[in-house]
């Protein structure tokens, strides 16, 4: 019988080290037990430092099984295995490598528990948009309100399908031709307005998820862009004007070069070139600009302007809302020869059921289909971190035609003349817009890896 003074383990088999804690084993008489390898049959044996006449002789007995209590387990005749220094070093290296890889995996999973986004495949909704004109103490000699009409997109299962559009009262221009994909404005005009007037537009629309899974080989070179598209969507656009339509010298240089979309600006080109480096593929260039902006530009906590900022202002502020960041992205792309345009509409918030005005980028790419390169408009939404993904929570009512006056008109959709004013103003101080969701239902789910 022996024991370990370190942990208290007891056992009847002679041994050198405690099988539990590897401490020195003490025999019943208080002697240490040694290890020998020269048994008469060539096998291992235990040598007792006591006399060989002790019970059990010089060789240990067969392993005995203990049935019981704490501190006892099956005794064995083998000494605990010893590892060489080299073996230990190798094992430590292996453990560190495994721990590093596993640790990185666990960290990534914990810090990014959801590695994908889930979007509905389709949405069908109805909403009501109410414009309220309140002259207050003013007498409106003339007024004009216009609103862009959403259209059905091409295709058998279009990403946007306008089922019904109705208005009360009807616009003077009539309801738009829904069979035409050409953007149209609904216009209401009048004279001599002293009291509050409301105009209500109802929409019934179906939208579908669109994910463009493109590789570099799917997208052509700059030579594959139609020249008219390059001419239209790589130029400066949307001059900065005041509420009376007069030019604003935002740069304070005395020159009429103040555009919100300003790709000919030297700073914009230099920064865009720095971001993309030596990349030549339009898809990868636009992806790098997207990643740069998502990582470096913030969404403002509040917004007091009624119109979009210029690209230079957003660059200087390092922040901007949806259309501000879209305008900067468009400018950076255009400066490198990549056609891009502003797309505008409404975005649904499934959290609270509200609709808000929204702007994003329509990025034009030459994509190889059916043996040729075809121009494809793709969706880039910077503030929602979506690249080539169009979710069904939105609908489009205007896509930039390349004419900055159209964009100015979209933002300043109400104008009036009073008996005091000497001209027409586009100030939006007398009109409010409210959008109410009447119904919204989705079908299907689609996971998109982040």
Image: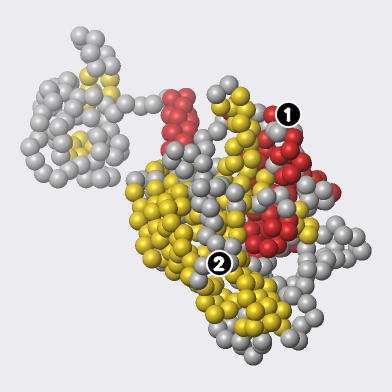
As rendered, which of 101 and 384 lies closer to the eye?
A: 384
**Image height of 117 relative to 302, above or below:** above
Q: Which mark is residue 223?
A: 1
**Image height of 36 relative to 420, above or below:** above
Residue 313 occupies quadrant: bottom right
As rendered, which of 425 and 255 lies closer to the eye?
A: 425
Direction from residue 171 to residue 45 in the image, left or right: left
What residue is at 39 percent from the left and 54 percent from the top? 124
Direction from residue 235 to residue 415 in the image, left or right: left
Residue 63 occupies quadrant: top left
Pair 1/2: label in front: 2
Circle 2: is it few (<14), some (14-19), or many (20+) Cα within 10 Å? many
Question: Closer to the N terminus: mark 1 or mark 2?
Answer: 2
Q: How is the image coloured?
A: secondary structure
What residue is at 60 percent from the left and 77 percent from the top? 431
Residue position for label 2: 171
What residue is at 59 percent from the left and 49 percent from the top? 182
Direction from residue 249 to residue 161 in the image, left or right: left
Q: Does the image show residue 79?
A: yes
């Amino acid at each position: 019988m022996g024991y370990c003074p370190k942990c208290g383990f007891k056992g009847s088999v002679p041994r050198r080290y405690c099988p539990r804690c590897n401490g020195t084993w003490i025999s019943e008489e208080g002697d240490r037990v040694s290890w020998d390898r020269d048994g008469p049959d060539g096998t291992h044996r235990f040598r007792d430092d006591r006399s060989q006449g002790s019970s059990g002789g010089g060789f240990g007995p067969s392993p005995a099984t203990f049935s019981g209590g704490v501190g006892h387990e099956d005794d064995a005749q083998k000494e605990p295995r010893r590892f060489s220094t080299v073996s230990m070093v190798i094992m430590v290296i292996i453990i560190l490598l495994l721990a590093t890889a596993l640790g990185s995996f666990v960290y990534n999973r914990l810090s990014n528990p959801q590695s994908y986004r889930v979007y509905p495949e389709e949405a069908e909704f109805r909403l009501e948009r109410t414009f309220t004109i309140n002259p207050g103490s003013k007498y409106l000699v003339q007024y004009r309100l216009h609103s862009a009409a959403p259209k059905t997109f091409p295709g058998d299962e279009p990403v946007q399908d306008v089922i019904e559009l109705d208005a009360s009262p009807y616009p003077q221009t009539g309801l738009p031709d829904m069979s035409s994909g050409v953007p149209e404005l609904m216009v209401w005009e009048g004279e001599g307005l002293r009291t509050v007037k409301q105009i209500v537009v109802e929409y019934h629309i179906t939208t579908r998820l669109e994910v463009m899974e493109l590789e570099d080989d799917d997208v052509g070179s700059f030579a594959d862009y139609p020249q008219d598209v390059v001419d239209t969507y790589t130029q400066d656009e949307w001059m900065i004007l005041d509420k009376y339509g007069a030019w604003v010298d935002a740069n304070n240089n005395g020159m009429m070069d103040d555009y919100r979309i300003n790709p000919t600006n030297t700073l914009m080109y230099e920064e865009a070139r720095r971001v993309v480096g030596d990349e030549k593929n339009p898809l990868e260039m636009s992806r790098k600009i997207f990643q740069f902006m998502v990582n470096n530009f913030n969404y403002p906590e509040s917004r007091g302007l009624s119109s979009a900022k210029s690209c230079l202002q957003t660059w200087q502020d390092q922040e901007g809302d949806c259309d501000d960041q879209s305008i900067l992205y468009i400018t950076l792309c255009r400066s490198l020869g990549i056609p891009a345009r502003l797309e505008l509409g409404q975005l649904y918030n499934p959290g609270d059921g509200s609709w808000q005005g929204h702007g994003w980028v329509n990025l034009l790419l030459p994509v190889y289909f059916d043996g040729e390169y075809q121009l494809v408009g793709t969706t880039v939404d910077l503030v929602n971190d979506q690249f080539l993904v169009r979710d069904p929570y939105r609908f489009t009512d205007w896509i930039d035609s390349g004419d900055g006056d159209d964009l100015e008109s979209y933002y300043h959709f109400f104008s009036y003349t009073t008996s005091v004013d000497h001209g027409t103003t586009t100030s939006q101080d007398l009109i409010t817009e409210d959008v109410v969701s009447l119904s919204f239902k989705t079908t299907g789910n689609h996971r998109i890896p982040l």
